[in-house]
Amino acid sequence: MRGNGITNLAPLARFSELTELDLSANQITDLAPLATLATLNDLDLASNQIRDIQPLASLPNLRTLSLFDNQIEDISPLASLQTLNGLSLAFNQVQDLNPLSDLTDLYRLSLVNNELRDVSPLATLVNLEVLYLDENQITDIQSLNTLTRLFELTLRDNPVAANANPVCPLTPATICQF
């Protein structure tokens, strides 16, 4: 259903056994009809016009979720999604990462081009292997030294990368891409 100009999700509410759904590149604003799809494992909502993600809190089985390129500021509804292992919130307006701090199954996280300054809430995500933080306002990454499973960390176009010799707090230091 990708790229079909979809605006109304109400007809999907009756498909309660769906496990995968790609609704990317549409014109969706209201996610309320998705709240009944509790069996969803993989959901792609990239490139829509979404601001409110509260209905996603009712999807306890989500493993992967793409919210890339929307208008999301408040990610607190994601705090209940304990089975998430892949999450893209790139190209939104996220500032507060605290709601993600208990999502310890996450191993892939994209937060490119948001309004992030503080990444310390991510320090508890010890299973992270890939973390994209490019194009934010991040000045300090010391708190990320707890992420020993990381093998890729991108920080391009952040104040921390503007230092003459930015220091990676991880081992090996080649994990960090400034």
Image (spheres, grey):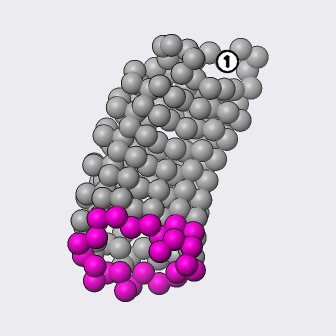
The location of residue 25, given as percent across then percent down, is 57, 69
Examine the structure image and report whether residue 14 is included in the region drawn in magenta. yes
Q: Looking at this view, is 20 or 122 the one in front?
A: 20
Where does the magenta region start and end?
Answer: 1-25
Q: For residue 102, which quarter of the picture?
A: top left
Tag count: 1
Examine the structure image and report whether residue 54 is included in the region drawn in magenta. no
The location of residue 116, given as percent across then percent down, is 59, 42
Q: State left or right for residue 1 relative to residue 92.
A: left
Q: State left or right for residue 174 relative to residue 53.
A: right
Q: For residue 72, which quarter of the picture?
A: bottom right
**Residue type, label 1:** Pro
Above or below residue 63? Residue 109 is above
The residue located at (40%, 33%) in the rendering is 128
Q: Which residue is under mark 1? A: 166
Provide the major secondary structure of the magenta segment.
loop
Q: Quadrant of the C terminus?
A: top right
Above or below residue 65? Residue 14 is below
Q: Looking at this view, is 17 or 105 the one in front?
A: 17
Q: Is residue 10 visible?
A: yes
Above or below residue 13? Residue 53 is above
Q: Secondary structure at mark 1?
A: loop
Q: Looking at this view, is 115 or 35 the one in front?
A: 35
The location of residue 139, given as percent across then percent down, is 64, 29
The residue located at (28%, 48%) in the rendering is 82
Q: Residues within 10 Å of mark 1 (few under 14, many from 20)?
A: few
